[in-house]
Image (cartoon, rainbow, N blue to C red):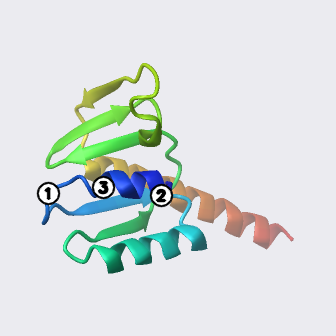
Amino acid sequence: MSEKTLAMMLKREKGVSVTIYTYDKSKVLELDLATYNEQYPDSPMQVLPSYGMHDRFLFIDDTAYHFGASLKDLGKNTFFFTQEDFTLDEVLKESQKIQAEKESLALQDDNAD
């Protein structure tokens, strides 16, 4: 996620909530997010962890969209997205499953030492 993504989120209506799920919740992102939420208290965002997902998804109410490229590249070149039949809960459950498998493998590696 970049500052450009944060800037795009300003275009939404007040009161529309945004939650970004990402595997890369770095200190820079945390600082950018805190600054954003301080500057725009009527349109806060939260960032939560997600594991094992490379693609980009957008969930609006109960509708899922899959993006073939990063949202920061929207409009630069040909850009495709499709409406999907899965739910946010299904994606998050898969993410949790992947994380549990990674943690289990890490424990097995630690126990082998």
Q: Residues within 10 Å of mark 1 (few under 14, many from 20)?
A: few
Could you tell me residue 60's position as x and y percent? 19, 46
Q: Residue shown at 59%/74% (left/top)?
A: 27
The residue singled out by tag 3 in the image is 9
Q: Could you give the CA–CA distance between mark 1 and mark 2, rounded to whole angstroms? A: 19 Å
Numbered label attached to residue 3 = 2
Disc 2 marks which amino acid? Glu
Front-most of residues 58 and 97: 58
Disc 3 marks which amino acid? Met
Which image quadrant is residue 48 in? bottom left
Could you tell me residue 105's position as x and y percent? 67, 60
Could you tell me residue 85's position as x and y percent? 22, 32
Front-most of residues 13 and 45: 13
**Sequence-first tag of 2 and 3:** 2
Callout 1–callout 2 Cβ contact below 8 Å: no
**Sequence-first tag of 1 and 2:** 2
Could you tell me residue 5's position as x and y percent? 41, 52
Q: Is residue 19 left or right of residue 34?
A: left
Q: SS class of the residue under badge 1?
A: loop
Q: Residue shown at 42%/19% (left/top)?
A: 78
Q: Residue furthest right?
A: 113
Q: Is residue 51 left or right of residue 44?
A: right
Numbered label attached to residue 13 = 1
Q: Residue shown at 29%/26% (left/top)?
A: 82
Q: Residue shown at 19%/74% (left/top)?
A: 42
